[in-house]
Amino acid sequence: MALGYVGVLTVRVEMPWVGNLKEKRALVRPVVERLKARFPLTVARLDGLDAHDWEVIGVATLSNDYGWVEETLRMASDFIAREGEYRVVSEEVEINVLGEDGEEED
């Protein structure tokens, strides 16, 4: 029996019209902060931190309810796509089972 589920969402956003890192951070950081405040998630800027025109945002959550994890990540994805002045060019969702080892519990 599964103890729970860990869900991870990674989203790559691009903004080729941005000319410097300060301008990019001004677009991405507020979305990341609002996402943290609005949903029960851990959120991080994962990749592209030194690039001025793209970035990868990572989102993670944990629950004993698979449907809740799936729905929360979907809402986070929709929020990221809707809230920022950038283009979402790719996203990936992975949900892993915790504690499923095939052993019977007493």
Image: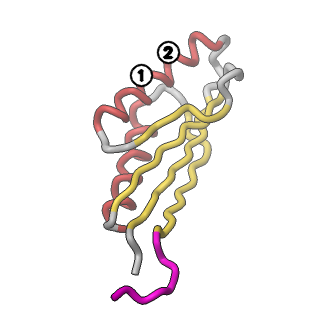
Question: Magenta part of the protein: which range?
Answer: 99-106
Viewer-side residue, 94 vs 15: 94
Q: Which residue corresponds to mark 2? A: 26
Secondary element at tag 2: helix
Give above or below for 32 relative to 50. Answer: below
- What is the x, y in percent for residue 20? 66, 11
User: Marks 2/1: CA distance?
Assistant: 7 Å
Q: Which residue corresponds to mark 1? A: 30
**Image disc number at residue 14:** none
Residue at x-position 40% and y-position 37%: 82
Asked whether, in this view, residue 59 is left or right of residue 64, the answer is: right
- What is the x, y in percent for residue 9? 51, 50
- What is the x, y in percent for residue 72? 35, 53
Residue at x-position 56% and y-position 46%: 10
- The quadrant where residue 35 appears: top left
Q: Hey, what amino acid is under mark 1?
A: Pro
Residues at discs 2 and 1 in contact (Cβ within 8 Å) = yes
Give above or below for 77 relative to 23. Answer: below
Give above or below for 50 relative to 60. Answer: above
Asked whether, in this view, residue 46 is left or right of residue 103, the answer is: right
Quadrant into which the N terminus falls: bottom left
Question: Principal SS element in the magenta part?
Answer: loop
Q: Hey, what amino acid is under mark 2?
A: Ala
Q: Residue furthest front?
A: 106
Viewer-side residue, 81 vs 31: 31
